[in-house]
Structures are given as structure tokens and as C-alpha cells.
Image (cartoon, coloured by chain):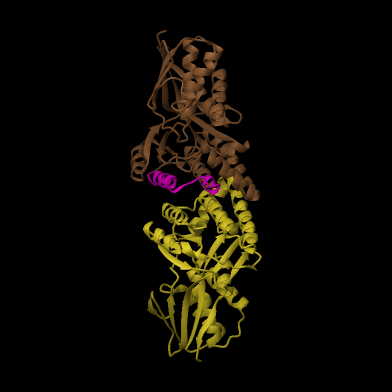
Chain colours: A yellow, B brown
């Protein structure tokens, strides 16, 4: 039996703009998906979504990994079980985490000898296969951990602060939101293009603020980034409520993380404000998760094979 | 007895950015302040704020006009009474409206022969005297009426749409908010300067959308402008609620008008959505005022002198 786990991610800066090659800062956060794997007679995938064999309806990401690896390195059967603390479809990279944790589990069970770069890029190919288009950032950050400047993939100092995620529990489609931004950009290029490049500039400034451990300014710039996300049409009332509530409760900064239009926001917070911010997120209708950046990307938690 | 009235104003685009010489669009809206004036033994100023002589505490703007005019064109006494439908201190230009209506009333009572340009510039000098610094736009638009491109002062087509104002009833200080933007700009010039210039670009695009009567796009760009206002730190929870509620209820666009941080928002709306938007603004804790752009700037409503 082998257990591997991989973390969720949040964007401190730059979601959406990164699609247009602007800079972004993405962090692995210590909310994890665990994948247990062992040899078995058949292929069995067991998750909160149900128990099945290879079934693209029930767990397309895990099924795709299982199939791809079987073609490369044939094996008889495996039993896989998945537990996750990452809310699904909320912009925290739950699919990337399950994909890289599953690949890592196979890598150890079958002694495939993949390094982390290979796990990340294999993971990205799976995400692309299932989603049609997918950012390589989610799988990269979930594999490597830490705080990563995009597109350079340079590791930055982690913020020595808490991150409080607020989940609106409102479903949002990343594809639709990316398309919405593209449409606005094609209609009002003289307005939307500079907004996207300004998000990139905020992200670059964020890099030096992280370096200087100036979290007050970092939070202030996250708030600026939030306005720019509103400007490109990816805000919504539920997110605004959680964001404004967090700020009122003492967050250094708060913004959407991920595609917006629902999903999650993230607040940067000092220890003494954690309780108040969590409470206000709850009062505003959200589900708070207190976490922080982790250097631990995908990892083996248990291995007795 | 002479009665003069002057309208409130809203910004369709460009507040705050206009301070940095970017383009803006400002409209006179049909919410008015009326000033009645007649000869009297003494100087008496009667308004909802109280009855007094020249008293800078009770009505500094009117007192300043009374004094300035007495120096230029001595008279014995006047009785002035003021009624206003414009909420005070909420970014709708209530002080400009009372100033230009008072000047216009004196102009007719004393046969001063001032034209509209003189009324506007005299009004601006009064606003500067009381506020320390003041935009000339409020007094200009309240005097001239219509839809005005700033800084060119070019008259544009009025939007053939309703404007629904939502008042948060939260006090905000224009001076403090202008200072907040200036401070952000000095700390993060590479981020804030392009945001202000992008507001200007949105406003320029707004001019051609007004020309083409494309109100759907005009509303969409007002929403973009709103995000940019959030980005420069002048949003607040109460405003966001009214803005998101208006959009959900069918507004073509909705944004802060004025300094933000409280005060008012304005929604662009077609006839069939007026009731729903007004109701949702009320449900979200605001006070709705349904209005529209008026070509009628300062005017004489009654004159039997």
C-alpha cells in the first residue's frame, strides 16, 4: 500500500491575466488530496464520488491516469482510493492535485522512476486531455509546492502569513469565464488589454513585496488585483461579500482565487485576525478554510510495498 | 419672489481619474434643488438645515454666495428658502446645485446680467472657497445640464435610458478618498497610473457608445469602470451590494457615482427593469431614486419680481 498526497493552490496575483502571458504568483496551500494505491486483481477506483473501474463519468482524471500508465507499463490491477480536503470545482486545483497524487502513487508502486518535472508535465497532459485546454500551473505548483512566479517558474519566499480561503459554494465554469474575458478583450481591446497588463504589473510588484516580507502592502495590492478582476467581469455578489467581510474583519488583503464567478476567495491574514475573518466569512454565507503556503508538493506519505 | 432650480449630476465614467486629467462623462440628472428668493428687511436663510442669517455653520455655500454678491451689488436684505431633492454629501453634487441655483436667483432678482458661463465659474469659485479644492465639473454640469465630456466640455447625446441612483446613506469624505487614491498612486505608480488612464479610455469609448445609442455596451463598460474604481480602493461593501443587486435585477450596468467609500451608485436601466432594480436596491439596504438625464441646467422656475 502506498499513499501519496498533493496540495491545492491559490493565486496571490494574476489569474486570467496569466492566460495572456502576464506574470502571476501561485502558491501551494496545505489542503491536500490523498491517493492510496495497492496491487489488486482488478482495477477499482474508490472515491467520494463512488466506486468503479475505469470510468470517465465517475472519475475521469484518475481513469485517464490509470489508462495512460497501463499502456506504458502494463500491470494486472490496482485498487485506488481517494480522499480529499480540497473542494471540487472551486478554483483550488482539485483536479491537478488528484492527478499528480495518482501519478506519484503509480510512480512508486510500479517503480517508474519519474522525477517531479515528469510528474508535473504528465499531469498537465492528463488535464489537457480531460479539459480540452488547461493551464500547466496547477499541476506544476501542486507537484513542486511553495510560492511560484509564473511564467518563469521561479520559486519565491513563502508569505509568512495565514491564508484564509472562503468558498462561496457557487459553481463556476473556468472555461466560460476565460471566454467571457476573451470576449470583453475583443470588444474593448483598448480598455481590457491594459487591465490585464496591469494585473501582471501588480504581480511583479508582489514578487518584491514577498521578498521584503511586506505583507501589509502585499495585501493592499491583492485588493487592487481584486478590483481589476471585477473590471474584467469575473466577480459576483457572493464573492464580493466574502471579500469585503474579510477585509472588515482585519484581512491584510482579499481577492478571488481562480476563475471567479463563484468558487473561492482568499484572504491574507495575521494570526490575531484568523478567528474574526473565519467568522465573518461564515456570516457572509461562505465556508472558511484556514491554511497557509506549503513547500510540500506531491509527496509519498506512506509506502510499505 | 423668484424660484430657481438646478440639477444633481452623476458620472457615467471617470470620477477620480478626472483628477489626473483623464476623460470623464458627467450628466445632469433630474433631481433638483430649488432656491426661492425675495427682498426682505434682513438676510434670512431658511433651509431644511435650519433658519439663520449669514451663517457658515448652517449653510456655508449659500452664506458665501450672499456675502460675495452683497460686496459686488449691495442690497438691503433678502429672504432665501431652499428645498432640495438631492441627498446631501452623497456625491450627487448637492453643494454645486444649491450654489448655482442661489447665484441664478440673485442674478434675476438683482438683474446682474450674468450668463451661464459666469454663473458656472462664479459657482466654482464659491465651491473652492468652502471646500479648499473643488472640481469645476459639478458647477458646470449643474449650470448647463445635459451630458458633458470632460475635460473638453463637449456636449454629448443624452442616454435614452433611465438612471437609477442607489444611496447607501453611508457618509464618505471626497477629500479623504481623493487622498487615498493619491497615496496608492505614489506607492504603486506602475499599477495605479495605468488604471487611471484605463478609466479615461473607458470614458472615451463611452462617448462613441453614447453617440451610437449602444446602451448594452455602455452598461458593460460602466461595469468595467466600477471594477477599476474598486481597484483604486474607493469601493465598499454597501456599494457593492447595491451594484450587484442592480445588475442581478437587470441593470445594463451599475457603478459608483462620485467619490465612493459610501455615497451613491448609479444603474443604467431600460423601462421594464426599473421596478425590479428599485426593489432590489431597497432590499440591499439602499434608497433608490429613479431619474434620467436632463438638458435643463440651472433655470428660473418662477419670477414675479
Q: Is residue B131 visible?
A: yes
Left or right, A75 with reference to B152: left
Farthest residue to the bottom: give it: A305
Q: Is residue A68 visible?
A: no
Q: Count of labels shown?
A: 0
- Image quarter of residue A24: bottom right
> Which range of residues does the magenta coloring cover?
B228-249
Q: Is residue B290 above or below residue A139?
A: above
- Image quarter of residue B34: top left
Which one is in front, B160 or A92? A92
Left or right, B16 with reference to B82: right
User: What residue do we see at 58% from left, 71% from top?
Assistant: A146
Residue A88 x, y percent position in the rendering? 43, 68
Q: Is residue A82 above or below residue B80?
A: below
Residue A248 x, y percent position in the rendering? 45, 53
Which one is in front, A298 or A64? A298
Residue B189 x, y percent position in the rendering? 65, 48
Q: Is residue B128 above or below residue B270?
A: above
Q: Is residue B80 above or below residue B255?
A: above
Left or right, A125 with reference to B270: right
User: What residue do we see at 64% from left, 64% from top?
Assistant: A211
Residue A165 x, y percent position in the rendering? 46, 63
Q: Majority secondary structure of the magenta segment?
A: helix
Question: Residue B106 in magenta?
Answer: no
Quadrant in which the C terminus of chain B is drawn? top left
Quadrant in which the N terminus of chain B is drawn? top left
Question: Residue B231 in magenta?
Answer: yes
Amino acid at each position: 500500500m502506498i499513499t501519496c498526497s498533493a496540495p491545492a493552490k491559490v493565486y496571490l496575483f494574476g489569474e486570467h491575466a496569466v492566460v495572456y502571458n502576464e506574470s502571476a504568483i501561485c502558491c501551494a496551500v496545505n489542503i491536500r488530496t490523498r491517493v492510496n494505491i495497492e496491487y489488486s486483481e482488478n482495477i477499482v477506483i474508490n472515491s467520494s464520488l463512488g466506486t468503479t473501474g475505469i470510468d470517465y463519468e465517475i472519475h475521469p482524471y484518475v481513469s485517464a491516469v490509470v489508462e495512460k500508465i497501463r499502456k506504458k507499463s502494463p500491470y494486472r490491477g490496482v485498487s485506488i482510493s481517494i480522499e480529499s480536503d480540497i473542494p471540487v470545482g472551486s478554483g483550488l486545483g482539485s483536479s491537478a492535485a488528484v492527478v499528480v497524487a495518482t501519478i506519484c502513487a503509480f510512480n512508486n508502486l510500479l517503480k517508474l522512476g519519474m522525477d517531479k518535472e515528469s510528474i508535473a508535465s504528465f499531469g498537465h497532459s492528463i488535464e489537457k486531455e480531460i479539459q480540452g485546454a488547461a493551464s500547466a500551473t496547477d499541476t506544476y505548483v501542486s507537484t513542486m509546492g511553495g510560492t511560484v512566479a509564473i511564467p518563469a517558474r521561479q520559486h519565491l519566499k513563502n508569505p509568512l502569513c495565514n491564508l484564509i480561503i472562503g468558498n462561496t459554494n457557487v459553481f463556476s465554469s473556468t472555461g466560460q469565464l476565460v471566454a467571457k474575458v476573451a470576449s470583453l478583450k475583443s470588444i474593448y481591446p483598448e480598455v481590457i488589454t491594459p487591465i490585464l497588463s496591469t494585473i501582471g504589473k501588480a504581480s511583479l510588484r508582489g514578487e518584491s513585496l514577498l521578498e521584503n516580507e511586506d505583507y501589509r502592502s502585499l495585501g493592499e495590492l491583492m485588493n487592487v488585483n481584486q478590483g481589476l478582476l471585477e473590471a474584467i467581469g469575473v466577480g459576483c455578489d457572493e464573492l464580493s461579500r466574502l471579500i469585503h467581510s474579510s477585509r472588515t474583519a482585519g484581512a491584510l488583503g482579499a481577492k478571488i482565487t481562480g476563475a471567479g464567478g463563484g468558487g473561492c476567495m482568499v484572504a491574507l491574514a495575521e494570526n490575531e485576525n484568523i478567528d474574526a475573518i473565519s467568522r465573518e466569512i461564515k456570516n457572509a454565507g461562505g465556508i472558511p478554510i484556514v491554511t497557509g503556503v506549503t513547500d510540500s508538493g506531491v509527496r509519498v506519505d506512506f509506502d510499505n510495498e
